[in-house]
Image: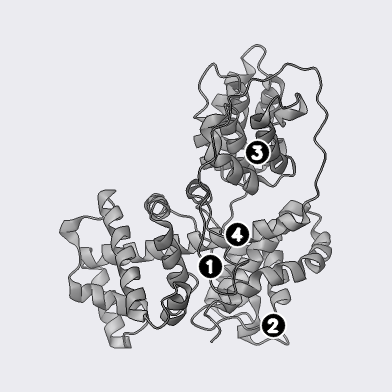
Amino acid sequence: MRTQGQHLAELPRHFHALRGPYLKWAVRFRQPVEVCLAHYRRALIGWYEARIAPVEPFVGEVDHYVKEVAEVYFTDQLEKAVLVADRRPITELGYANDQNPLNHLPRPIQLNETQQLMLRLFQEQGKNCRELLLMADYHRLTPDRLAQVLNLDGQVVEVEERRRKCLLMVRESWQAAGITDPAHHPSPADEDRLDRYYEGLLDTTERWEVEARRSSDVVLRRAMELREDWAAVLTVAGRLDLMSTLQREETHYAVRRPTAPADAQKEIKLTPRRKPFLRIGSFQLPGLETALAGLLAVALAWLLYSTFGAAAPERKAVAHFEPFPNIFQRMQPRNEDERDLQRILRYYDRKDYLTAYDELLPVAPAYPAAPLYLGVSALALEQPTRALEWFAQIPEGNYYRPFAEWYEALAYLAEGRKPAAIITLTEISETPGHPYQGKARALLAEL
């Protein structure tokens, strides 16, 4: 099977080869191009996961898969389609079951609180450990191929030892965070049996024994839950890595626009930018440089912990969402630091919120406006919880606080927290001179 990196290398090539025909096909759905491309990237990642699946991988045409799955996204029918396919394979004239995309849909993942914490702890591990675990457990590279990646040709035992140590550090972080209790660890024999259970190496009788014990053995049940949580976390982290790669590929199509002219409106003071932090790199598979463009920054991965599910904000939030204007539409940058910020906000102007977030994140403490732009970008990326965390960092009395309050209300609506949104909107509507007083009253009338 070609599961040792070849399909990963093919992913960017498919992205460029199919992008034009896909956009022409997607016109029928009458959606903004950003929405069409978001579904395109998700469908391509779905194809990749289906293609490298260890059991019954998808072997049909990539173009057919992408369009079939993207249509499911356009019609907001993913969860229903998954349930239908789980009940029995979907048959389609002219296609075998292993060639039908609807039998190989990406499963939505909404991380619970424990899994969210596990993802944060994973992202706090060393870069080499993060990448090694993703290559082994998400991308399913064989130990031999991993040895090549690490320049340890033939030293499979050494590779396995490194992976074991990385997993040990992950589990130690769980214990330190209170996720696991050292007094309730399964025995080494049970750990070995669970390894074999999840690797599919137990016979039918042995599997039944494990599953029967799960209902009565609290320690074993918790150990199994942790492994299943961990598998979901690695899937999310892997999807984020691939999404980052495809986002970077998309920049090849970006249209550069001139900076908007300045006017004489009130100047906004900016704090000088600190020197940027070292960007996170990524070791590369031989011959896969484009495909392995690098993992997302720690906080960006935390931002996007929910993937492939029904993540769209509530309709009212969407209808009233407009990005906060670029401050350099009202003033000229005064120095090199501000010109650097202006450069970052050009991604924001192009609605490339993922890149804008990635660029702003390392220097967020340097700019008073950064938490607002990061929060608005998070909201545009359909992550209202993370957006609220950024807005909360803007203190009362800050110039940007009134603007953050409006976007907080939209984020509450996007989360489905209507009472919180009404409270915030009411406060805005009752504040004389609030820049969003009129909009808040209009939105309140709709709720």
Crowding near the residue tagged with mark 4, few <14, some 14–19, many ≥20 C-alpha atoms within 10 Å: many
Left or right of 244, for residue 206: left
What residue is rendered at 76% in x and 24% in y? 330
Residue 359 quadrant: top right
Q: Residue 215, relative to residue 421: is it above or below? A: below
Please name the amino acid that badge 3 sits on.
Ala
Question: What is the CA distance from the residue labelled 2 to the residue labelled 1?
Answer: 39 Å
* Labelled disc at residue 243: 4
Point out which mark residue 284 bears: 1
Residue at mark 3? 317
**Distance in Å between CA atoms under marks 1 and 3:** 40 Å
Q: CA separation, marks 2 and 3?
A: 38 Å
Q: Amino acid at mark 2?
A: Glu
Whether the residues at callouts 2 and 1 have beta carbons within 8 Å, the answer is no
Q: Nearer the viewer, residue 417 or 385?
A: 385
Give the mark nearest the N terminus, 4 or 1: 4
Of tags 2 and 3, the one toward the viewer is 3
- At x 31%, y 69%, the residue is 164
